[in-house]
Image: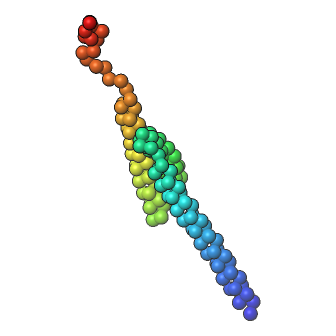
Amino acid sequence: MALIPAILLQAESVEATLSENATIILLTIYVLLLAIFLGFELIGRVPATLHTPLMSGTNAIHGIVVLGAMIILGSISGSSFGDNILKLLAFIAVVLGSANVFGGFVVTDRMLEMFKRKPTAGKSAGARGSR
């Protein structure tokens, strides 16, 4: 008879754990949807002249993802199937994040090149003509 209350207590703790996990998942989905909506609204209201610098800056900030993936990649010490999957995902995150950071700097460099003054041949003080 003492076994039945122990089983009921385990069932209640399983329900509590599932309830906590469901709450965490729902909050995570809520934050994700809110971030998507907010990002769409903010980017949609940016003028075209500021779009390229804003996007190149956010791509450069993507370096935080690269740093986090490198920390995770360095901290994995096991060789189980799950650890190997985690290593693969972290490696892919490092490669894609690095490409994104590099692309952000290339776009910024190209954008800044547009604002440099180009020397013009043929315009000198004597070429204007004297009247």
The reply, left or right, for residue 123 in relation to residue 47 is left
Q: Percent from the top left, x then y, of residue 123? A: 27, 15
Residue lying furthest front in this view? 131
Which corner quadrant holds the C terminus? top left
Q: Nearer the viewer, residue 103 or 5?
A: 103
Looking at the picture, does residue 21 appear above or below residue 43?
below
Looking at the picture, does residue 15 appear above or below residue 60?
below
Q: Nearer the viewer, residue 42 or 17?
A: 42
Q: Percent from the top left, x then y, of residue 39? A: 50, 53
Residue 102 visible in this rendered orientation of the protein: no
Q: Residue at x 30, y 9 (%)?
A: 125
Residue lying furthest right in this view? 2
Q: Percent from the top left, x then y, of residue 63? A: 48, 44
Looking at the picture, does residue 45 appear above or below residue 126?
below
Residue lying furthest bottom in this view? 1
Q: Residue at x 37, y 26 (%)?
A: 116
Q: Which residue is drawn at 71% across and 82% down?
A: 9
Looking at the picture, does residue 26 appear above or below residue 114?
below
